[in-house]
Image: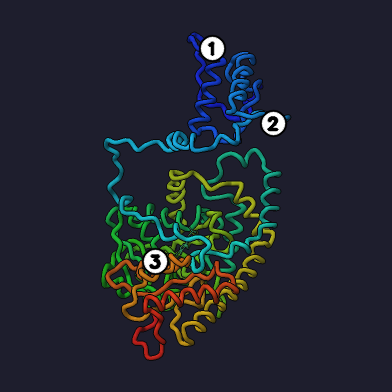
Amino acid sequence: MTRSPRGLVPVLAIDRGGSRPLYRQIYEAYRDAILGGRLGAGERLPSTRGLARELGVSRFPVLTAFDQLLAEGYCESRAGAGTFVAADLAGELLGASRQAARRPAVPTGPRRVSGGPAARLRRAPFARRGSAAFSVGAVATEAFPFRVWGRLLSRQARRLAPGQVHYGETLGVPRFQRAIAAYLRTARGVRCEDDQVMVVSGSQQALDLAARALLDPDSAVWLEDPGYWGARDTAELAGARCVPVPVDAEGLDVAAGMARCPDARVAFVTPSHQFPLGVTMSAARRLLLLDWASHHGAWIVEDDYNGEYRYESQPITALQALDREARVIYVGTLSKVLSPSLRVGYVVLPEDLVDRFAALRAALDIAPPTYLQEALADFFTEGHFAGHLRRMRRLYSRRRGALIDALRGELGADVEILGEGAGLHLVLTLPEGADDLEISDLAAGAGLHVLALSSCSLGATRRRGLVLGYGGVPVDSAPEAVRRLAAILDRAHAAPRSSKGSTQARP
Ligand SMILES: Cc1ncc(COP(=O)(O)O)c(C=O)c1O
């Protein structure tokens, strides 16, 4: 068997009939690749033997070319290790040509792109967040179970069988489907068989699949207002007509939705901890929503993105558990309980939608990665998941307490805080007239990622407030982060008013 050489081979077409000697062709190809930035400092060149084999030439011209590259300082040889692009070549001299080689100039002339819904998408606020305090969606990354996860992954790598490096099952690895179904039945009250579970690339993909599978261009969709832009974006991409439905203290105002657009095809909701207000949908509203769906032949997409975290009572059973007509598509994610970088979520599908979702998924990216799911299945079945979840509940409960204490300490004991009973974020209400967008910008300047409540509005009414994530704010950093926030509120003349005597109803 011919082995490919270790080390990079530049694009190089040997011209045997030409006037340039072979060694010169090889030398120039490497020299141009180095000068053009296609081969970077420290990159390894192949062995002369391997390259000669790859090019179908004798070793002699390759040795001569390499000698020349070494003599002119483009390369250096390290005893016993091989030949490498010289480390000290980087400099102004190379800068311009490297830039040009890596980032081709945008040509003039027509460059046509879609003018449809994709043209209206903006990068989500999530793209801006990182580890800065109050980032919504941030989790306690340092509490990730690095050791166990590393062990499971490497064990999985050692066990990997040939069948597992082929395309995987579209719905997911059966062992992992089973583990998720068991967890959801027990912990979230979800009613499902294992084969109704589809593993997805984060709940965002589930929302996208639901929008594609259920909506026609111009179908109406109920969206919570204020609500999650991720759901809105998928509905808009599907060409649907978004109908903002207000959220009050009981969750989605179903009666308002019916008054505005009774025959919507789908309702996207976050019943456990409404995003962003943090309201839990009341039992009466849940029943009303299911009743509406039943009478209008509609679907409900339940985005249970952080239903695991509830601090003053037991987690609330999923809306799907009340559904007698299989109209709820239940969506969950490992982003908040394990890590958002895994990009693993799951959907529980009504039986009659399984094939439709599977066909769509196959058209989009065929299947979720097998190897990752095998390790995750171990993580669940060996009890690590349950233990980790317990630890994370305690940790976030402390972070939540620290943030609330700091807010009350800094801004007054009766400052109005909403949605603090569950999830990983809360909402700080602002006095009338305060500009939450301006405050969010000021905060960004001070290294705080504060989400303006009004940026989550879909309709005409723009409620003002600050959505503060605490998942990524350690207990001992909360007081300082809140002091910085309070200083910004002072500068913006927006220090929250006491809730006593406030005319603003809770959501
Ligand atoms: C309402 C809502 N749904 C879903 C998600 C999670 O998305 P994913 O599972 O794609 O990471 C988030 C992320 O913060 C969210 O706020």
Tell me the residue that label 3 is attached to.
Answer: 441
* Label 2 – label 3 distance at C-alpha: 51 Å
Give the number of the mark in front: 2 or 3: 2
- Element carrying mark 1: loop
Residue drawn at (69%, 48%) of the image:
154
- Element carrying mark 3: helix
Q: Counting other residues with Cα less than 10 Å from the Cα at mark 2, is it few (<14), some (14-19), or many (20 or more)?
A: few
How far across and down, in percent of the image, does residue 414 sit? Answer: 46, 87
Colour scheme of this structure image? rainbow
Q: Is residue 233 left or right of residue 168?
A: left
Q: Of residues 84 and 334, which is closer to you in this image?
A: 84
* Label 2 – label 1 distance at C-alpha: 27 Å
* Residue 89 visible to an observer of this rendering: yes
Q: Which mark is residue 21?
A: 1
Tell me the residue that label 2 is attached to.
Answer: 78
Q: Outermost residue, right direction?
A: 80
Q: Is residue 88 above or below residue 443?
A: above
How far across and down, in percent of the image, does residue 38 sit? Answer: 51, 32
Residue drawn at (62%, 67%) of the image:
389
